[in-house]
Amino acid sequence: MDKGLRIVLVETSHPGNIGAAARAMKTMCLSRLVLVNPVEFPHADASARASGAVDVLEQAEVVRTLDEALAGCALIAGTSARQRGLGPPVLSPRECMQRLHAEAAKGQEVALLFGRERTGLTNEELARCHILVNIPSNPDYSSLNIAAAVQVLGYESMLARGAVPAAGESEEIPATAEEMEKLYEHIESAALETGFLDPANPKHLMRRVRRLFNRARPDQNEVHILRGLLSALQNPKPPRRKV
Ligand code: SAH
Protein backbone atom coordinates (compact mmCIF):
# COMPACT_ATOMS: atom_id res chain seq x y z
CA MET A 1 0.00 0.00 0.00
CA ASP A 2 3.00 2.33 0.20
CA LYS A 3 2.16 3.92 -3.15
CA GLY A 4 -1.62 3.66 -2.76
CA LEU A 5 -1.59 5.40 0.62
CA ARG A 6 -0.92 9.11 0.71
CA ILE A 7 -0.06 10.88 3.92
CA VAL A 8 -1.67 14.31 3.87
CA LEU A 9 -0.46 17.03 6.25
CA VAL A 10 -2.87 19.94 6.43
CA GLU A 11 -1.45 23.46 6.98
CA THR A 12 1.52 22.37 9.05
CA SER A 13 3.08 25.39 10.82
CA HIS A 14 6.56 24.12 11.60
CA PRO A 15 8.71 22.94 8.71
CA GLY A 16 10.69 20.79 11.19
CA ASN A 17 7.55 18.74 11.76
CA ILE A 18 7.20 18.12 8.02
CA GLY A 19 10.77 16.82 7.91
CA ALA A 20 10.25 14.65 10.99
CA ALA A 21 7.03 13.26 9.46
CA ALA A 22 8.92 12.41 6.24
CA ARG A 23 11.51 10.58 8.30
CA ALA A 24 8.81 8.68 10.21
CA MET A 25 7.22 7.74 6.86
CA LYS A 26 10.41 6.43 5.32
CA THR A 27 11.23 4.27 8.34
CA MET A 28 7.81 2.67 7.88
CA CYS A 29 8.19 2.18 4.10
CA LEU A 30 5.79 4.99 3.17
CA SER A 31 6.79 7.46 0.48
CA ARG A 32 3.83 9.51 -0.75
CA LEU A 33 3.57 12.80 1.10
CA VAL A 34 1.06 15.54 0.22
CA LEU A 35 1.26 18.95 1.89
CA VAL A 36 -1.79 21.19 1.91
CA ASN A 37 -0.78 24.86 2.25
CA PRO A 38 2.28 24.36 4.44
CA VAL A 39 3.16 27.60 6.28
CA GLU A 40 6.87 27.33 5.41
CA PHE A 41 8.10 24.82 2.86
CA PRO A 42 10.66 24.03 1.54
CA HIS A 43 12.76 25.00 4.54
CA ALA A 44 16.17 24.11 5.97
CA ASP A 45 14.53 22.82 9.18
CA ALA A 46 12.42 20.38 7.18
CA SER A 47 15.47 18.98 5.40
CA ALA A 48 17.45 18.81 8.64
CA ARG A 49 14.75 16.90 10.50
CA ALA A 50 14.13 14.59 7.54
CA SER A 51 17.73 13.37 7.85
CA GLY A 52 18.09 10.45 5.42
CA ALA A 53 14.51 10.85 4.20
CA VAL A 54 15.00 14.00 2.12
CA ASP A 55 13.91 12.00 -0.92
CA VAL A 56 10.41 11.80 0.59
CA LEU A 57 10.43 15.61 0.98
CA GLU A 58 11.74 16.18 -2.52
CA GLN A 59 8.94 14.05 -3.97
CA ALA A 60 6.27 15.65 -1.74
CA GLU A 61 3.35 17.24 -3.58
CA VAL A 62 2.43 20.71 -2.39
CA VAL A 63 -1.19 21.69 -3.05
CA ARG A 64 -3.42 24.62 -2.07
CA THR A 65 -6.64 22.85 -1.15
CA LEU A 66 -7.76 19.66 0.55
CA ASP A 67 -9.79 18.84 -2.57
CA GLU A 68 -6.60 18.67 -4.62
CA ALA A 69 -4.93 16.54 -1.94
CA LEU A 70 -7.80 14.05 -1.93
CA ALA A 71 -8.31 13.82 -5.71
CA GLY A 72 -8.91 10.21 -6.74
CA CYS A 73 -9.14 8.85 -3.19
CA ALA A 74 -11.70 6.14 -2.48
CA LEU A 75 -11.19 5.93 1.28
CA ILE A 76 -10.17 8.83 3.53
CA ALA A 77 -9.19 8.49 7.18
CA GLY A 78 -8.73 11.49 9.48
CA THR A 79 -6.66 11.56 12.64
CA SER A 80 -8.00 13.06 15.80
CA ALA A 81 -6.34 13.66 19.14
CA ARG A 82 -9.77 13.59 20.77
CA GLN A 83 -12.60 11.09 20.73
CA ARG A 84 -15.34 12.95 18.86
CA GLY A 85 -19.04 12.45 19.47
CA LEU A 86 -20.66 13.20 16.15
CA GLY A 87 -19.11 12.39 12.83
CA PRO A 88 -17.47 9.39 11.20
CA PRO A 89 -16.81 6.26 13.28
CA VAL A 90 -13.60 6.37 15.32
CA LEU A 91 -11.40 3.30 14.86
CA SER A 92 -8.27 2.12 16.62
CA PRO A 93 -4.95 2.57 14.76
CA ARG A 94 -4.91 -1.16 13.98
CA GLU A 95 -8.45 -1.29 12.60
CA CYS A 96 -7.96 1.91 10.63
CA MET A 97 -4.73 0.81 8.95
CA GLN A 98 -6.22 -2.59 8.17
CA ARG A 99 -9.19 -0.88 6.49
CA LEU A 100 -6.90 1.40 4.47
CA HIS A 101 -4.66 -1.48 3.53
CA ALA A 102 -7.58 -3.68 2.43
CA GLU A 103 -8.81 -0.89 0.16
CA ALA A 104 -5.33 -0.13 -1.23
CA ALA A 105 -4.83 -3.85 -1.92
CA LYS A 106 -7.84 -3.62 -4.28
CA GLY A 107 -5.94 -0.97 -6.22
CA GLN A 108 -7.77 2.02 -4.73
CA GLU A 109 -6.10 5.24 -3.67
CA VAL A 110 -6.45 5.94 0.04
CA ALA A 111 -5.48 8.89 2.26
CA LEU A 112 -4.62 9.50 5.88
CA LEU A 113 -5.03 13.10 7.05
CA PHE A 114 -3.09 14.88 9.77
CA GLY A 115 -4.12 18.25 11.17
CA ARG A 116 -2.51 21.50 12.26
CA GLU A 117 -0.21 21.45 15.28
CA ARG A 118 -2.39 23.77 17.36
CA THR A 119 -5.91 23.06 16.21
CA GLY A 120 -5.89 19.73 14.38
CA LEU A 121 -8.41 19.20 11.56
CA THR A 122 -11.51 21.40 11.31
CA ASN A 123 -15.00 19.91 11.58
CA GLU A 124 -15.46 20.44 7.84
CA GLU A 125 -12.24 18.56 7.13
CA LEU A 126 -13.23 15.74 9.48
CA ALA A 127 -16.60 15.54 7.72
CA ARG A 128 -14.74 14.70 4.50
CA CYS A 129 -13.43 11.53 6.13
CA HIS A 130 -15.06 8.10 5.93
CA ILE A 131 -13.38 7.01 9.15
CA LEU A 132 -11.46 8.61 11.99
CA VAL A 133 -8.57 7.20 13.95
CA ASN A 134 -7.53 8.07 17.46
CA ILE A 135 -4.23 6.93 18.97
CA PRO A 136 -5.01 5.89 22.55
CA SER A 137 -3.09 8.21 24.87
CA ASN A 138 -3.13 9.94 28.25
CA PRO A 139 -6.65 11.37 28.73
CA ASP A 140 -5.08 14.41 30.41
CA TYR A 141 -2.56 14.97 27.61
CA SER A 142 -3.67 13.24 24.46
CA SER A 143 -2.02 15.32 21.76
CA LEU A 144 1.02 13.69 20.16
CA ASN A 145 3.50 15.60 18.05
CA ILE A 146 2.33 15.24 14.46
CA ALA A 147 5.43 13.28 13.38
CA ALA A 148 5.00 10.97 16.36
CA ALA A 149 1.42 10.34 15.22
CA VAL A 150 2.71 9.60 11.69
CA GLN A 151 5.19 7.15 13.22
CA VAL A 152 2.56 5.23 15.19
CA LEU A 153 0.15 4.95 12.27
CA GLY A 154 3.01 4.19 9.87
CA TYR A 155 4.02 1.33 12.12
CA GLU A 156 0.47 0.02 12.06
CA SER A 157 0.50 0.24 8.28
CA MET A 158 3.64 -1.95 8.26
CA LEU A 159 1.81 -4.49 10.43
CA ALA A 160 -1.28 -4.31 8.24
CA ARG A 161 0.82 -5.02 5.15
CA GLY A 162 2.38 -8.01 6.88
CA ALA A 163 5.77 -6.56 6.01
CA VAL A 164 7.26 -7.28 9.43
CA PRO A 165 9.35 -10.40 9.96
CA ALA A 166 8.47 -12.13 13.24
CA ALA A 167 10.76 -10.83 15.98
CA GLY A 168 13.83 -12.90 16.67
CA GLU A 169 13.18 -15.35 13.86
CA SER A 170 16.44 -16.58 12.41
CA GLU A 171 16.95 -17.03 8.68
CA GLU A 172 18.96 -20.18 9.38
CA ILE A 173 17.60 -23.70 9.07
CA PRO A 174 16.83 -25.13 12.51
CA ALA A 175 18.54 -28.41 13.43
CA THR A 176 16.36 -31.51 13.09
CA ALA A 177 15.60 -34.00 15.88
CA GLU A 178 18.10 -36.48 14.35
CA GLU A 179 20.85 -33.87 14.22
CA MET A 180 20.19 -32.99 17.85
CA GLU A 181 20.31 -36.66 18.91
CA LYS A 182 23.71 -37.00 17.17
CA LEU A 183 24.92 -33.90 18.97
CA TYR A 184 23.82 -35.30 22.37
CA GLU A 185 25.56 -38.62 21.64
CA HIS A 186 28.66 -36.69 20.68
CA ILE A 187 28.60 -34.58 23.85
CA GLU A 188 28.04 -37.69 25.97
CA SER A 189 30.90 -39.64 24.36
CA ALA A 190 33.25 -36.66 24.72
CA ALA A 191 32.17 -36.27 28.36
CA LEU A 192 32.89 -39.95 29.02
CA GLU A 193 36.20 -39.99 27.14
CA THR A 194 37.55 -37.03 29.04
CA GLY A 195 36.40 -38.36 32.42
CA PHE A 196 34.07 -35.39 32.89
CA LEU A 197 31.11 -37.77 33.10
CA ASP A 198 31.30 -40.70 35.52
CA PRO A 199 29.17 -43.51 34.03
CA ALA A 200 28.57 -44.88 37.53
CA ASN A 201 27.18 -41.54 38.64
CA PRO A 202 25.78 -39.66 35.62
CA LYS A 203 23.37 -37.54 37.72
CA HIS A 204 21.18 -35.60 35.33
CA LEU A 205 23.95 -34.25 33.13
CA MET A 206 22.44 -35.21 29.78
CA ARG A 207 18.94 -34.12 30.80
CA ARG A 208 20.31 -30.72 31.69
CA VAL A 209 22.26 -30.51 28.45
CA ARG A 210 19.08 -31.31 26.53
CA ARG A 211 17.18 -28.67 28.44
CA LEU A 212 19.82 -26.09 27.60
CA PHE A 213 19.73 -26.86 23.86
CA ASN A 214 15.93 -27.05 23.73
CA ARG A 215 15.86 -23.51 25.09
CA ALA A 216 18.42 -22.30 22.59
CA ARG A 217 16.99 -24.16 19.54
CA PRO A 218 20.30 -24.12 17.64
CA ASP A 219 20.33 -24.03 13.85
CA GLN A 220 22.16 -26.54 11.64
CA ASN A 221 25.21 -24.38 11.31
CA GLU A 222 25.55 -23.98 15.08
CA VAL A 223 25.26 -27.75 15.58
CA HIS A 224 28.01 -28.24 12.99
CA ILE A 225 30.25 -25.82 14.85
CA LEU A 226 29.70 -27.60 18.18
CA ARG A 227 30.30 -31.02 16.68
CA GLY A 228 33.44 -29.80 14.92
CA LEU A 229 34.70 -28.39 18.21
CA LEU A 230 33.98 -31.66 20.06
CA SER A 231 35.80 -33.67 17.36
CA ALA A 232 38.78 -31.35 17.54
CA LEU A 233 38.90 -31.68 21.33
CA GLN A 234 38.70 -35.46 21.01
CA ASN A 235 41.54 -35.59 18.46
CA PRO A 236 43.75 -32.63 19.28
CA LYS A 237 46.20 -31.41 16.64
CA PRO A 238 49.15 -29.12 17.35
CA PRO A 239 47.89 -25.53 17.50
CA ARG A 240 48.25 -23.39 14.42
CA ARG A 241 50.56 -20.46 14.86
CA LYS A 242 49.37 -16.92 14.33
CA VAL A 243 51.13 -15.37 11.34
N1 SAH B 1 -5.51 20.29 19.65
C1 SAH B 1 -5.41 19.49 18.47
C2 SAH B 1 -4.15 18.71 18.51
C3 SAH B 1 -3.49 18.63 17.23
S1 SAH B 1 -2.07 17.63 17.30
C4 SAH B 1 -6.62 18.55 18.38
O1 SAH B 1 -7.30 18.42 19.39
O2 SAH B 1 -6.90 17.97 17.35
C5 SAH B 1 -1.62 17.65 15.58
C6 SAH B 1 -2.01 16.45 14.80
O3 SAH B 1 -1.32 15.31 15.29
C7 SAH B 1 -3.48 16.07 14.86
O4 SAH B 1 -4.27 16.83 13.98
C8 SAH B 1 -3.40 14.64 14.44
O5 SAH B 1 -3.20 14.56 13.05
C9 SAH B 1 -2.14 14.16 15.14
N2 SAH B 1 -2.41 13.60 16.47
C10 SAH B 1 -1.93 14.05 17.64
N3 SAH B 1 -2.34 13.27 18.65
C11 SAH B 1 -3.09 12.30 18.12
C12 SAH B 1 -3.80 11.17 18.65
N4 SAH B 1 -3.82 10.91 19.96
N5 SAH B 1 -4.46 10.37 17.78
C13 SAH B 1 -4.45 10.62 16.46
N6 SAH B 1 -3.80 11.67 15.90
C14 SAH B 1 -3.13 12.49 16.71
Image (cartoon, grey):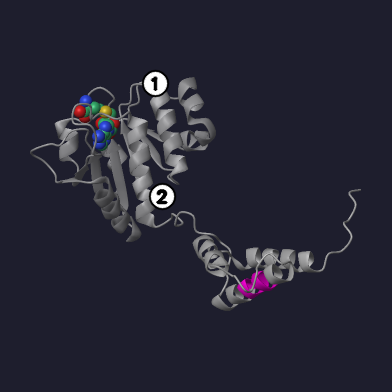
Residue that appears at 24% across and 44% down: 77
| Residue 190 in magenta stretch | no
Q: Position of residue 186 (x, y in %)?
A: 67, 73
Q: Is residue 89 left or right of residue 232?
A: left
Q: Secondary structure at mark 1?
A: loop
Crowding around mark 2 (Cα neighbors within 10 Å: few <14, some 14 to 19, many 20+) is some
Q: Is residue 65 visible?
A: no
| Residue 185 in magenta stretch | yes
Q: Would you place residue 48 above or below residue 66 in this image?
A: above
Q: Is 96 in front, or is 225?
A: 225
Q: Would you place residue 57 above or below residue 130 in this image?
A: above
Q: Is 210 in front, or is 62?
A: 210
Compute the Cα span from label 2 to label 1: 26 Å
Kindly identify which residue carries mark 1.
40
Q: Which of the 4 image quarters holds residue 11? A: top left
- Ligand 1's quadrant: top left
Q: Which of the 4 image quarters holds residue 63? A: top left
Q: Position of residue 102 (x, y in %)?
A: 30, 58
Q: Would you place residue 6 above or below residue 216 in this image?
A: above
Identified by mark 1, the residue type is: Glu
Asked if the beta carbon under badge 1 is closer than 8 A to the nearest atom of ligand 1, the reply is: no
Prevailing secondary structure of the magenta residues: helix
Q: Position of residue 196 (x, y in %)?
A: 68, 64
Residue that appears at 27% across and 45% down: 93
Q: Are marks 2 and 1 in contact (CB under 8 Å)?
A: no
Mark with earlier residue (2, 1): 2
Q: Is residue 212 visible?
A: yes
Kindly identify which residue carries mark 2.
2
| Magenta region, residue range | 183-189
